[in-house]
Image (spheres, grey):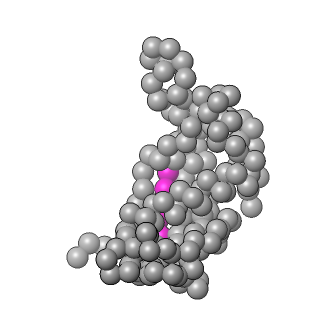
Amino acid sequence: MPAMLNFPLIAPMFSIPIRIYYEDTDAGGVVYYANYLKFFERCRTEWARSLGCDQASLLRDEGIVFVVRSVMLDYLAPGRLDDLLVASLALEKIGRARIDLLQSVSRNDTPLVTGRVSIVTVRTTGEGEAARMSATPIPDSLRQKLETCP
């Protein structure tokens, strides 16, 4: 049996509620495993919004988007139809173009899924080679907001 990843329990810096609907579950009423990635994404998006990072403006004005570079997850317990869950995150590390986050989905303070997600800032504009989606430094205005996160 493979070893569990054992991500540290996080003291969340940001959380959102997630209600489990029929569409989120499999035939047995259990949350389909891939949907946790959607819940993680929603949490990251709302966190960025709370920092004043408008992703549509970042794309339009600077040609920059966030993309997931890597994900590692531990599935600890099932979420079920009609559960009220909480998706949370904590900032682990900020690199030049990369942000590492610890994320979880919990029910009543009991973790169901924990994981580590790395996202990178990528430039989508330009011509020739520059038009490729290549890593680019995190904009200074966003970096300042990230560095002052609690």
User: Quarter-wise, where is residue 26 in the image?
Assistant: bottom left
Residue at x 57% of width, y 80% of height: 84
Quarter of the figure that contains the N terminus: bottom left
**Residue 94 falls left or right of residue 145:** left
**Residue 77 falls left or right of residue 48:** left
Give the answer, above or below, for where 150 lies relative to 82. Answer: above
**Residue 34 falls left or right of residue 48:** left
Residue at x 59% of width, y 56% of height: 44
The verdict on residue 149 being magenta is no
| Of residues 2 and 64, the one drawn nearer to the viewer in this rendering | 64
| Of residues 120 and 82, the one drawn nearer to the viewer in this rendering | 82
| Image coordinates for residue 114, horizontal then vertical, percent | 47, 70
Outermost residue to the left = 1
Quarter of the figure that contains the C terminus: bottom right
| Of residues 69 and 29, the one drawn nearer to the viewer in this rendering | 29
Residue at x 37% of width, y 70% of height: 32
| Image coordinates for residue 14, horizontal then vertical, percent | 67, 65
Outermost residue to the front = 22
**Residue 6 falls left or right of residue 19:** left
Magenta stretch, main secondary structure, is strand
| Image coordinates for residue 13, horizontal then vertical, percent | 68, 65
Q: Does residue 4 appear in this view?
A: no
User: Quarter-wise, where is residue 10 in the image?
Assistant: bottom right
User: Quarter-wise, where is residue 64 in the image?
Assistant: top right
Residue at x 46% of width, y 80% of height: 81
Magenta residues span: 114-118
